[in-house]
């Protein structure tokens, strides 16, 4: 496997990136990228100047295994990880971990201090879903439990901290869980 700029990848790899968004999010987040047109738009946006888009390609045949994208916020001090997706048949093989580590290095090179992301719970994957998180969302967050393999645990293993929750972000009982990690050299 090699990780490279998605912009430098073939047109076919970019089309695979769009298809992978639809496929990779279909089970738990079907409204994220409901069709190829929506996914193609995200791929195009991720290739905009000032953003980072990285592709993990199979070394043998150049097949896209996964990809990640980030965009700067707060004058470049913070970068939002807007996309991380790995081909379902290739998950749990270190590809996502490699993409996140690579993204951390790219953000650090750009002078970024923090990477953050939101990870929705639209499919009752955690103890935060299906309940009224008010009046004290942080109390619920302190007792978060993972019921169905929600990605927040992957990010925590990568050194991210849960930084907050936005109740009802995706409808009643469907929160967005925020995670953040410092990438500043200390």
Image: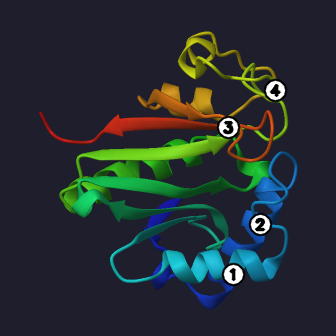
Q: Of circles 3 and 2, which is in front?
A: 2
Q: Looking at the picture, does residue 146 appear above or below residue 33?
A: above
**How many residues crowd mark 4 within 10 Å: few (<14), some (14–19), many (20+)?**
few
- Towards the viewer: 43 or 93: 43
| Pointer 4 residue | 148
- The kind of secondary structure element at disc 4 is loop
> Could you tell me which residue is drawn at 57 percent across and 83 percent down?
44
Q: Is residue 5 left or right of residue 122?
A: left
Q: Position of residue 62 (x, y in %)?
A: 61, 73
Residue at x 41% of width, y 37% of height: 180
Quick one: label 1 or label 3, which is nearer the N terminus?
A: 1
- Secondary structure beneath dot 2 equals loop
Check whether the beta carbons of the residues at disc 3 and disc 2 lie within 8 A of each other. no
Circle 2 sits on which residue?
33
Residue 56 in the image: above or below residue 149: below
Q: CA distance from mark 3 to mark 2?
A: 22 Å
Residue that numbered label 1 is attached to: 40
Secondary structure category for the residue under label 1:
helix
Q: Are marks 4 and 3 in contact (CB under 8 Å)?
A: no
Mark 3 nearby-residue class (10 Å; few <14, some 14–19, many ≥20): few
| Place of residue 30 in the rendered image (x, y in percent of width and height, measured from the top left) | 85, 56
The residue that mark 3 highlights is: 92
Gap between marks 4 and 2, in whole Å?
21 Å
Q: Secondary structure at mark 3?
A: loop
**Distance from label 1 to label 3 (Cα)?**
26 Å
Marked residue nearer the N-terminal end (4 or 2): 2
The quadrant in which residue 41 appears is bottom right
């Amino acid at each position: 496997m090699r990780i490279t700029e998605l912009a430098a990848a073939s047109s076919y790899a970019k089309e695979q990136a769009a298809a992978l968004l639809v496929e990779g999010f279909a089970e738990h987040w079907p409204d994220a990228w409901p069709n190829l047109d929506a996914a193609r738009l995200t791929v195009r946006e991720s290739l905009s100047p000032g953003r980072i888009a990285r592709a993990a390609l199979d070394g043998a045949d150049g097949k896209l295994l996964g990809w990640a994208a980030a965009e700067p916020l707060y004058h470049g001090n913070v970068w939002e990880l807007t996309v991380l997706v790995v081909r379902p048949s290739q998950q749990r093989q270190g590809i996502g971990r490699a993409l996140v580590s690579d993204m951390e290095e790219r953000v650090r090179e750009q002078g970024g201090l923090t990477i953050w992301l939101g990870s929705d719970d639209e499919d009752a994957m955690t103890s935060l879903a299906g309940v009224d998180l008010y009046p004290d969302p942080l109390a619920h967050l302190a007792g978060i439990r993972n019921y169905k393999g929600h990605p927040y645990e992957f990010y925590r293993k990568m050194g991210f901290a849960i930084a907050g929750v936005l109740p009802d972000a995706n409808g009643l009982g469907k929160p967005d869980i925020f995670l953040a990690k410092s990438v500043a050299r200390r």
